[in-house]
Amino acid sequence: MNIVVRRARAEDVEAIFDIRTSVVHNHLSREQLSEMGITPSTLTEMLAADAGVWIAEVDGIRAAFSSIDDEDGSVFALFVNPDFEGLGLGRLLLQEAETALFHSHETIWLETDGREGIRANGFYRKHGWIHVDTMANGDIRYEKRRPK
């Protein structure tokens, strides 16, 4: 098995949407993403601006992605197609996101679904993220400080 993590390109847009809509936890449809302003055209613009978006491929198949908002210091998204879970893709993509964000931020953050049984919470805690707040909508905010 060959795993490659690389910067996302315009030709990855459809695969990113396929991955994002394939997940069971925190699932959103294309319509819901569009209502949030996340469309193929906005994603293509992000990629053209060299925003922090990475793709993980397994044997040439796009299987997972992550993205950051470097301006506010957040991990914006990290999703793995369920068919490729357990291969370490999330860990590899999180490392890329953290490395990029720590270049310009002392503390970085993310928010994820806080409901019981959401595996992302255990994943982030396992990787050193600290639960700092529970939002009014039930999401959990995590933060991580740059290693000394």
Image (cartoon, grey):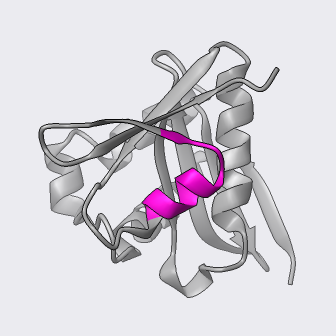
Task: Tell me residue 32's x, y (percent).
Answer: 16, 56
Q: How many marks?
A: 0
Task: Tell me residue 9's x, y (percent).
Answer: 63, 47
Q: Is 46 located above or below residue 125 in the figure?
A: above
Task: Tell me residue 119's x, y (percent).
Answer: 44, 69
Label the magenta part by its dominant secondary structure.
helix
Tell me the residue at 53%/34% (across/down).
Answer: 68
Q: Is 101 located above or below residue 84 in the figure?
A: above
> Which residues are the magenta region?
120-130
Q: Does residue 125 belong to the magenta stretch?
A: yes
Q: Work out whether residue 5 can be spotted.
A: yes
**Quadrant assignment for the C terminus:** top right
Task: Tell me residue 53's x, y (percent).
Answer: 59, 42
Q: Nearer the viewer, residue 72 or 7?
A: 72
Tell me the residue at 40%/62% (across/down).
Answer: 17
Q: Is 68 located above or below residue 25 in the figure?
A: above
Instruction: Judge from the rendering whether residue 143 lies leftward or rightward of residue 54; answer left or right.
Output: left
Name the image quarter holding residue 24: bottom left
Q: Does residue 142 belong to the magenta stretch?
A: no
Tell me the residue at 44%/58% (across/down).
Answer: 121
**Quadrant assignment for the N terminus:** bottom right
Q: Work out whether residue 8 can be spotted.
A: no
Name of the residue lying farthest toward the right: 2
